[in-house]
Amino acid sequence: MSGIIHKSYDTKGEGHQVIVTRVDAAVNWIRKNSCWPQPMGLACCAIELMAAGASRFDIARFGAEVMRFSPRQSDCMIVAGTCVYKMAGVVKRVWDQMPAPKWCIAMGACASTGGMYRSYSVVQGVDHFLPVDVYISGCSTARSAA
Ligand code: SF4
């Protein structure tokens, strides 16, 4: 539990453990370990995102299986897929509706860089209009075709 000053002791006789900490440190630790993602599925990577929430990959292990389809209840936007300029304004609007603190994951080559689409219509990375915290490289479609 980084950043938390705590003391613990075992009372032996009763078998209880007591942790003393600050409320804000505890709340921040809980938030850090229980992201509520805002899925922003734009293309094929969204299928991979759905798979991540299903039983085989089980994103619940990270406390993040509660996908929220309301930006008001989310603190981590996962942009999954190719973002065209037509959609960028919508994505930005949803992002703006999420309360701070919040984080952004660009999932896949397209969200990170535009991927293989060097096109006038495709945003060459969602970090052109979002503060991306994590980039996930790769393309599952290219992998499947190989
Ligand atoms: S990175 Fe690949 S799988 Fe993801 S949206 Fe782009 S083409 Fe689809």
Image (cartoon, rainbow, N blue to C red):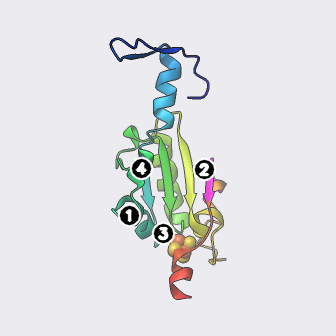
* Residue kind at label 4, given as amino acid type: Arg
Query: Label 2 vs label 1: CA separation?
Result: 22 Å
Callout 1: 10 Å neighbours few (<14), some, many (20+)? some
Do the residues under discs 3 and 1 have CB atoms within 8 angstroms? no
Query: Label 3 vs label 1: CA separation?
Result: 9 Å
Callout 2: 10 Å neighbours few (<14), some, many (20+)? some
Q: How many marks?
A: 4
* N-term mark: 3 or 1: 3
Vertical position of residue 17 compared to residue 92: above or below: above
> Which SS class for mark 2?
loop
> Residue reaching furthest bottom?
146
Do the residues under discs 2 and 4 have CB atoms within 8 angstroms? no
Query: Which residue matches tag 1?
Result: 50
Query: Which residue matches tag 2?
Result: 130
Depth check: give the residue in front, 114 or 129: 114
Disc number for residue 61: 4
Vertical position of residue 20 compared to residue 115: above or below: above
Query: Which residue matches tag 3?
Result: 45
Q: Which residues are magenta?
A: 128-135
* N-term mark: 4 or 1: 1
Callout 3: 10 Å neighbours few (<14), some, many (20+)? many
